[in-house]
Amino acid sequence: MISFCQFGAGRIGAIHAENIVRHPGARLAAIVDVDRDAAERLATRHGAAVGTQAGVLADPGIDAVVISSSTDTHADLVEAAARAGKAVFCEKPLDLDRRRAEACLAVVGECGVPLMVGFNRRFDPHFARLEHQLRNGRVGQVELVSITSRDPSPPPLAYVRVSGGLFRDMMIHDFDMARWLLGEEPVEIFAAASVLVDPAIGEAGDVDTAIVTLRTRAGAEGIVGDKPQRFFLERYAEAYRRELDHFVDALTRNTPPSPGGGDGVKALALADAALQSLATRRAVAL
């Protein structure tokens, strides 16, 4: 039985908490959130305690942590949990700054704890079946992978201002999917983007519509599709369940979980390069 503490009691935190509780090999011991009322509501729903960061990380009864708090807390919490000897599941991205994410990954390596990054798309049954077919030659030679992601409405502006932007917050999933499905690293990226839906997003310094083309050394090109449901929470409900199952199974079997911290850094590097391409209006070599 893997005993979890979860940091974050918001929208994504509620999903992870539910998936921990439903897993027969896991238990949710504690919830930590800066909003104590939110932590208490989620903890009460699942029979968990409300804790503090220092308390849960010092507790030898806690085996692993799930980090679903705000992005600006991820790297610090990952490092603190790693130093406490806890296995770590962290929502993407590890940090908005790639050098900070790489430094965080170095701490995890020094501490020797398992780290999994929450790229849940890999665990969607449809994408997983496609990846299996690609690897086993059922589809044929891969020439082009097209991935489309859309939200039904603009996100709240308060979220836009702290999210890191479309490339690092939303399209980072597509960058990870492209790397995973293509089976090789992109060598060039070109991005074009604009504000076509909500002018307030542009005023907040972000874009709401973007197209990215990746080129790999083998020559395949992709635009960063399954037909989406209305919102990602419905579309990827099963993916969230399966990624948590994978994390618990990896800890139980003492095998490395995947995707790991290196995948998180590489997807963030693609997001950074896309922003560079957008700013320069030129393709960026990787």
Image (tube, rainbow, N blue to C red):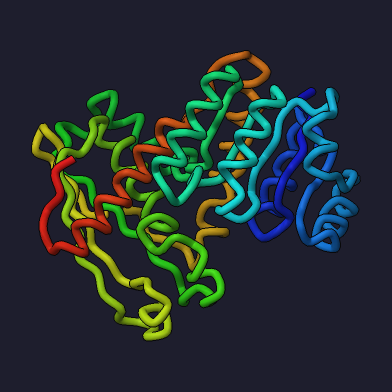
Identity of the residue furthest to the bottom in this view:
199
Residue 147, percent across and down?
Answer: 29, 53
Which sits in the foreground, 146 or 27?
27
Residue pictured at 20% horizontal, 65% vertical: 192
Position of the N terminus by quadrant:
top right
Residue 174, percent across and down?
Answer: 35, 50
Q: How many marks?
A: 0
Residue pictured at 29% horizontal, 43% vertical: 178
Which sits in the foreground, 218 or 58?
58
Residue 39, percent across and down?
Answer: 82, 55
State which quadrant residue 122 falls in. top left
Residue pictured at 46% horizontal, 41% vertical: 100
Residue 243, percent across and down?
Answer: 57, 37
State which quadrant residue 55 falls in. top right
Can residue 110 be seen by looking at this rendering?
yes
Residue pictured at 45% horizontal, 51% vertical: 96
| 7 up-or-down from 252: above or below | below
Left or right: 174 with respect to 106?
left
| 137 up-or-down from 32: above or below | above
Left or right: 202 with respect to 72?
left
